[in-house]
Image: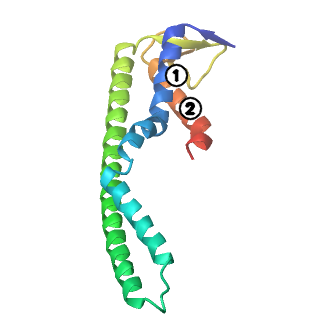
Amino acid sequence: MLEVINGFLLVYFLILCSVSALVPILVKPIIACFARPSNAERTVWTEIMKLKAEQKGISMKEEFAAYSRIQRKISKLEAQFKDNSQARIGKTLAIKSTIQIAFQIVVGLVTIISVIYFRREPIVALEGDMFPFTTMLRYPSEVPNAISTHMWVLISNLSIRILLKPVMS
């Protein structure tokens, strides 16, 4: 049987571990703001579509010079569009990595500071003897058969990441 000794810390560390595991999903909406094509990219894309529509109206056999001229313009604009989109994707990737790392650092620091601050607080107590794991599970708490903050964070983190693995994939 399980007896909750400190319900606040139990929920607090579950939330911290969940947020830590969900950082990649939480960052996606923020990244979406930076991943949008710029006005210049949209203008180039619109121009490409207009030129392609114009090119479809021209017979390649009868008006080869006009057809080729439009094709060169299309190729030039497509190369420009590709360069712009590659630059945007590179910038988006850099921003995504920076934001993810920053979120992980903040959550990690909050978790570490909390674990240090509440290090002697037991979270739950188990019924029965857990020998030979008793000392390891309760350290540095002195409550017999308790699970300390350190171990609770480790167990919660591992469990949440395993449970969320299908969602993250």
Element marked by disc 2: helix
Element marked by disc 1: helix
The percent coordinates of residue 76 (x first, y second) are 31, 74
Quarter holding residue 43: bottom left
Dot 2 alpha-carbon crowd within 10 angstroms: few under 14, some 14 to 19, many 20 or more = some
Residue 14 is tagged as: 1
- Compared to residue 57, the image places residue 135 above or below, namely above
Q: Amino acid at mark 1?
A: Leu
Residue at 31 percent of width and 60 percent of height: 84
Q: Residue furthest bottom?
A: 61
Q: Amino acid at mark 2?
A: Ile
- Compared to residue 30, the image places residue 119 above or below, namely above
Direction from residue 7 to residue 121 in the image, left or right: left
Q: Quadrant of the N terminus?
A: top right
Quarter holding residue 134: top right
Residue at 39 percent of width and 13 percent of height: 118
